[in-house]
């Protein structure tokens, strides 16, 4: 008997980490399998505090936030059948995800200690094809191979549709649309306009915001960075706005060192694109980095040096649970002012 014949499984997804990238895939995949998907609400100070309390203090802030979202899901939906915690090992044969993604289900299980079972979808193309991953997941829910392959292909198609929409549209709004819970609806924040009305729109600057999707689109922890830049008359572009074809070429740092962290690879490819073909389309780069992130600190130096060599203004912002709003605003305001003076003087 599969679960459609029993009862509709209620599965919770924490709105953190790769939800910001693969959320559209996961929700489509689980909904195809007739699951009732519950997503935790947008990040709040309470969620960050709760996550910080239980996570090891040396962990990066995105993982602490993830812990907070798991706790939030458990308290908002105490009747969940499962919490969905995927394990991303590798989706390209020559690359790995950050080790934190490899151990995420265990880190949550032993870090938080709760009774609701965890259900894991493991993505590891070094070991299994993607369809095999889906089939293994289906065994837990009692679905046959054919259904799981259909579920995977359906989710993939929905994921591609999402990426095409996000290429043109507002990424954060599109992600929010995955959650239909009215309690989680965000009110649009009215951000202070920094540019006097008389000259608004006349001295625009173009900024590339680099970083993991869970830093770039996590508006609580980055203090609405994209919205604030827009309120400072900046056109903002991100990795998601780069044509997909730009991610097919392999990145080699030098003969000894080949880039094998998958997310960092995307960041480096985006940086390289804007150093070559897209050079004249940006005026500055902001790199959002998580405090205590090993992979980020490895490539931060490379990105910074490359940008400086090509005389593209560069700023890095390190995010942690103590990052204050006023410090961030001051830094981005002076950065964009400096670029504006250089560009229009
Ligand atoms: S890549 Fe960095 S920020 Fe992301 S989970 Fe790993 S350590 Fe944390």
Image (cartoon, grey):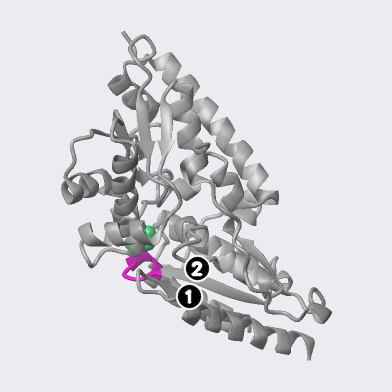
Name the residue tied to disc 2. Answer: 223
The quarter of the picture where residue 342 lies is bottom right
Query: Residue placed at 67% from the left, 71% from the top?
Result: 231
Mark 1, secondary structure of its residue: helix
Spot occupied by residue 343 in the image (x, y as percentages of width and height)? 75, 85
Q: Quadrant of ligand 1?
A: bottom left
Residue span colored magenta: 290-296
Nearer the observer, 251 or 328: 328
Q: Is residue 265 left or right of residue 168?
A: left
Spot occupied by residue 214 in the image (x, y as percentages of width and height)? 45, 56
Query: Residue placed at 33% from the left, 67% from the top?
Result: 294
Work out whether residue 275 can be spotted. no
Work out whether residue 290 can be spotted. yes
For marks 1 and 2, the one nearer the N-term is 2
Vertical order, 131 against 47 (above or below): above
Nearer the observer, 226 or 155: 226
Spot occupied by residue 118 in the image (x, y as percentages of width and height)? 26, 35
Q: Is residue 204 left or right of residue 301?
A: right
Spot occupied by residue 268 in the image (x, y as percentages of width and height)? 51, 64
Q: Decide: marks 1, 2 in contact (CB < 8 A)?
A: yes
Query: Residue placed at 35% from the left, 74% from the top?
Result: 322
Specify whether residue 329 is painted magenta. Answer: no
Ligand 1 contact, mark 2 (Cβ < 8 Å) = no
Quarter the N terminus occupies: top left
Circle 2 packing at 10 Å, graded few (<14), some (14-19), many (20+), is some
Vertical order, 220 against 19 (above or below): below
Mark 2, secondary structure of its residue: loop
Name the residue tied to disc 1. Answer: 325
Quarter the C terminus occupies: bottom right
Nearer the observer, 246 or 56: 56
Circle 1 packing at 10 Å, graded few (<14), some (14-19), many (20+), is some
Query: Residue placed at 60% from the left, 49% from the top?
Result: 173
């Amino acid at each position: 008997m599969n679960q459609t014949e029993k009862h509709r499984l209620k599965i919770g997804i924490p709105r953190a980490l790769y939800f910001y990238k693969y959320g559209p895939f996961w929700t489509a995949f689980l909904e195809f399998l007739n699951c009732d998907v519950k997503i935790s609400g947008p990040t709040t100070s309470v969620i960050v505090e709760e996550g910080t309390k239980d996570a090891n203090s040396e962990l990066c802030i995105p993982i602490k936030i993830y812990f907070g979202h798991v706790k939030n899901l458990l308290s908002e939906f105490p009747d969940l059948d499962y919490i969905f915690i995927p394990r991303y090992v590798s989706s390209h044969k020559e690359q790995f995800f950050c080790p934190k993604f490899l151990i995420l289900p265990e880190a949550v299980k032993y870090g938080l200690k709760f009774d609701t079972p965890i259900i894991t979808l493991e993505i590891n193309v070094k070991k299994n094809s993607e369809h095999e991953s889906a089939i293994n997941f289906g065994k837990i829910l009692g679905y046959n191979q054919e259904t799981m392959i259909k579920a995977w292909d359906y989710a993939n198609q929905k994921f591609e549709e999402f990426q095409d929409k996000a290429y043109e549209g507002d990424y954060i709004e599109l992600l929010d649309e995955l959650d239909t819970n009215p309690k989680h609806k965000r009110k649009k924040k009215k951000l202070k306009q920094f540019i006097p009305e008389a000259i608004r729109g006349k001295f625009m600057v173009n900024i590339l915001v680099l970083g993991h999707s869970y830093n770039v689109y996590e508006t609580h922890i980055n203090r609405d960075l994209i919205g604030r830049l827009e309120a400072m008359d900046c056109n903002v572009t991100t990795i998601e706005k780069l044509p997909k074809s730009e991610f097919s070429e392999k990145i080699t740092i030098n003969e000894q060192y080949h880039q094998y962290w998958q997310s960092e690879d995307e960041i480096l490819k985006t940086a390289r694109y804007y150093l070559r073909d897209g050079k004249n389309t940006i005026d500055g780069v902001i790199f959002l980095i998580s405090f205590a992130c090993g992979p980020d600190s490895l490539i931060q130096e490379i990105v910074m040096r490359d940008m400086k060599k090509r005389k593209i203004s560069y700023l890095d912002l390190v995010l942690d649970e103590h990052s204050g709003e006023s410090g961030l605003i001051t830094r981005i305001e002076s950065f964009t002012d400096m670029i504006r003076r250089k560009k229009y003087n």
